[in-house]
Amino acid sequence: MKAMILAAGYGKRMGELTINTPKPLLQINNKPIISYLLQQLQKANVLEVIINTSKYHEQFISLLGSGSEFGLTIQYSHEGDYPLETAGGIRKALPMLGSDPFLVINGDIATDYSFEKLAKLHMDDGVNAHLVLVENPIHHSIGDFSLTEEGRVVAKGNQSYTFSGISLIKPGFIKQYDCRTLGELFKHSLGKINGEVFSGFWIDIGTPERLALARNHFQQ
């Protein structure tokens, strides 16, 4: 199985921290955020990784190279100076991703979710994707989706959850709709997407304050 790490964004909410450094390359304990994700993928035996890049393309190549340091093979999907957003970036990288379902992971999260579990998951016919959801964080209290008792992702239900930025996606699903973001894509296919709720450690590193929380976690 292959994985794609979404790393082409500008990280504007990080202020001065991302003036010259992309958010996935910010440091936690002297290692880039994205390094932790690469190590977790290697442990899950997901050994082929595609990383989309934009303005800071050369920094990713310089720091991560071919992936051999992590026991992986890394390919880069360069989008130029203007990111294609999440669904657009995946669509551009489809020739690298192949015909089988693949993992998609936001490059600016920190988590102890087991990618091995998702890599072994079988999606039935008629299911386009499987999303990992989390309890709504303070900064996103409204949530994104709900889950039925059967594990189907729906727009509204008794309880809302936030999309973690971790998913398993069939490549044909990306081709079905001309959407720029994954959020739009998922909303087009509600009823054909499964999900689960993860209750372990997870942080969306979208602000300097949440970067500090991630650093504190890994120092424990």
Image (cartoon, rainbow, N blue to C red):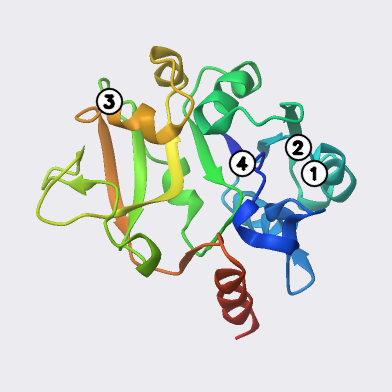
Horizontal side of 60 relative to 83 (left or right) equals right
Q: Earlier in the sequence, mark 4 or mark 2?
A: 4
- The kind of residue on which mark 4 rests is Ile
Distance between the alpha carbons at the discs numbered 1 and 4? 13 Å
Q: Earlier in the sequence, mark 3 or mark 2?
A: 2
| Dots 2, 1 in contact, CB < 8 A | yes
- The kind of residue on which mark 2 rests is Thr
Residue, disc 4: 5
Q: Earlier in the sequence, mark 2 or mark 1?
A: 1
Q: Earlier in the sequence, mark 1 or mark 3?
A: 1
Q: Earlier in the sequence, mark 1 or mark 4?
A: 4
Badge number at residue 67: 1
- Name which residue lies at 18% across and 47% down: 147
- The kind of residue on which mark 3 rests is Ser
- Name which residue lies at 55% across and 24% down: 88
| Dots 3, 2 in contact, CB < 8 A | no
Residue, disc 2: 73
Coordinates of residue 9 in the picture (x, y in percent):
64, 42
Task: Select label 1 or label 4 by which is in front.
Answer: 4
